[in-house]
Image (cartoon, grey):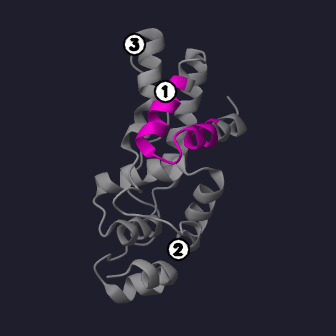
Amino acid sequence: MYETDFWQLIDETRATADGDPDEQADAMVDRLVQLTPDDVVDFARLFEARFQRAFTTELWGAAHLLLGGASEEDFDFFRCWLIGQGREVYEHAVHHPDELADLLPDFDEEEDGDAEDLGYAADEAHEQLTGTPLPDLDLPPQDGPEGPPLDFGDDDVMAKYLPRLWERFGR
């Protein structure tokens, strides 16, 4: 599976689900079970690589502001949700997290920012196709987020690193 195929699946399932993260996860499983097990593993590897790439302190700070706080688990689910928003939103957010203030005009912390099930779609599809768990993806583990440590509880720090998000979502 190529990266363009990966993002096409993301976009198609988001459109099918009308942006609902749980429905997108269900739609993704439905689409993935139509592929070969090798393609599902490729999808999982592409998903996990993007998930890891989004493990930055600045993006975690953005999630913290958008969600009104974000534990490590919350940030994991946020990164799944971010991937589910498609390539344009994802790439902008990874490179310039503060741009999320403009990219997400209708963000609702009660409904958005959590797509845990999307992160498990490839696991579920592979299990349905083969009866076995998804194999190890052979990606290097991460020790912690990339970037300088940020004190999410320090208003001055958050306003400095994420000024547009702070203006919209700061407490």
Q: Is residue 167 above or below residue 99?
A: below
Q: Amino acid at mark 3?
A: Thr
Q: Residue at x 39, y 13 (%)?
A: 132
Please state which of the two labelled residues, at mark 3 or mark 2, is closer to the viewer.
2
Q: Amino acid at mark 1?
A: Val
- Which label's residue is closer to the chain start, 3 or 2? 2
Q: Amino acid at mark 2?
A: Ala
Instruction: Please name whichever residue, 146 or 25, is drawn nearer the observer in this view of the structure.
Output: 25
Pointer 2 residue: 101
Q: Is residue 48 above or below residue 73?
A: above
- Residue farthest to the top, as pictured: 131
Pointer 3 residue: 132
Residue 160 visible to an observer of this rendering: yes
Label 2 crowd bin: few (<14), some (14–19), many (20+), radius 10 Å: many
In the picture provided, is 148 more to the left or to the right than 70? right
**Highlighted magenta segment, given as a residue range:** 9-30
| Prevalent SS, magenta region | helix
Pointer 1 residue: 29
Label 1 crowd bin: few (<14), some (14–19), many (20+), radius 10 Å: many
